Amino acid sequence: MNPPDRTGRPGAESGRLPIEARQLILLRGARSIGQGAFFVDLALYLAHLGWSGAAIGLVLTGGGLSTGVLALIVGATSDRLKRKPFIVGNEVLTLLAAVTAFFAHTPWLLAIPIILAGFGRGANGSAGPFAPAEQAWLAHLTPPKRRGRVFSLNTATGFFGMALGALLAAFPGFVHLGLLGYRLLFLLPVCASLFNLSLLAFIRETRPIPQKGVRTVRSRVRRRSENRSLRKLVLLNSVNGFAVGLIGPLMSYWFSVRFGIGPASIAPVMALAFAVTGVSSLLTGRLTERIGLVKSVVGMRSVGLMLLVILPVMPTYTLAALVYFLRSGLNRGSVGARQAVVTGLVGDERRGWAASLNATSFQFPQALGPALSGALIDQGDLILPFYLAFVLQLVYVVGYWRTFRHLESQAVAP
């Protein structure tokens, strides 16, 4: 392993990404496979069990709310403790939830693991409520000037895993095993968690636990500036989160209702969308080093907005699918860049807290979206959720540019 630099990051001076950072990215890839499968099939599985769209939306809402609450606690706590134990805790929680869901035959028993583990929310390989600790750990290991590219690589790895999982989601449509075909997909997160736990046993965390120091005038000024940026971020994320929640978690259900198709037709489209998004994330990493983090985010999200308007009025599934995976690449491809902006707004002693604010301010409003859109879909309104999302995301894009354009140079500061 490369020797640590003055900041304590192993190998930061050499420019080589530390092995611990590469291992964290590998964890995300393994985790994302099951998440991709359930992003496609969970709503379809619950519909086959006789759940209504509103009920499906509510259980996804519950998952978002539980993730948000735990993320706030994890983010603040992980800044004062080691971060590895939180990642281990996520894998144990996911493992237990997947085993429970596999054997569950009653709605309430199935709802509990879905809510606790966040199945079906398309988390792109993140560690659920423990993601703030993982993001802060990765930021600590990454040289500041490379965070845009590294976080984009981390995001891309998750999307490629989601693409593989989405392909596997076609399994129930081909094997004709009924509900058993869906339940077998819970073995994916079981295997991923077992693999990740074995890998975590060999990952060392060398970060020293921060100690409270004397607050100087300079540090107090910096803290006030950081807090202003975080407050603005929370407001913008709330708008964006609700918009994403309106359309993201129920897209496979929307495709099924709109065009009368099943997992065999939906899964390949979702897989292609995730693969395109993975490539987009890699390209975004390079783009951030050319034009900056904020410009990359705003540019990609702006084009994605135009595609959002036309998606629900596409007359055929083929055209709707084409628009969907193009928009997915542009919209989700900026996730890594946005995470890099957040981790650059504060110092290492508060990166977990900043990441948790970023996650929860998005997740709480996102959790409300499926409940509303599920009810609208049940009533036959298949367009209104998209147009509501468009208005909210337009507000987000304009606000993001106005708020963070002057932080372009600071966004990569240590």
Image (cartoon, rainbow, N blue to C red):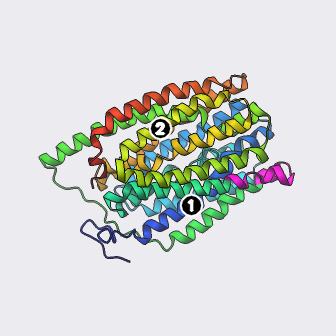
Q: Choose between 66 and 303: the one closer to the eye.
A: 303
Q: Which mark is residue 21?
A: none
Q: Main secondary structure of the magenta part?
A: helix
Name the outermost residue toward the left: 217
Q: Which residues are magenta?
A: 166-183
Q: Choose between 331 and 10: the one closer to the eye.
A: 331
Q: Is residue 177 magenta?
A: yes
Q: Earlier in the sequence, mark 1 or mark 2?
A: 1
In the displayed structure, 233 sits above or below 3; it is: above
Q: Choose between 356 and 310: the one closer to the eye.
A: 310
Give the quarter of the figure containing the N terminus: bottom left
Q: Amino acid at mark 2?
A: Arg
Residue 403 position within the rendered picture, expressed as x and y whole percent measured from the top left: 32, 34
Residue 145 position within the rendered picture, expressed as x and y whole percent measured from the top left: 32, 58
Q: Amino acid at mark 1?
A: Gly
Q: Residue at image x 76%, y 52%? A: 183
Q: CA distance from mark 1 to mark 2?
A: 24 Å
Q: Residue at image x 78%, y 54%? A: 171
- Which residue was labeled with disc 1? 29
Residue 190 position within the rendered picture, expressed as x and y whole percent measured from the top left: 66, 61
In the rendered structure, the answer to whether residue 367 lies left or right of residue 1 reads: right
SS class of the residue under badge 2?
A: helix
In the rendered structure, the answer to whether residue 266 lies left or right of residue 145 reads: right
Whether residue 106 is visible here, answered yes or no, is no
- Which residue was labeled with disc 2? 301
SS class of the residue under badge 1?
A: helix
Q: Is residue 3 magenta?
A: no
Q: Residue at image x 27%, y 43%? A: 226
Instruction: Please rate how many residues cluster around mark 1, counting C-alpha atoms within 10 Å: few if below 14, some from 14 to 19, many from 20.
Output: many
Whether residue 300 is visible here, answered yes or no, is yes
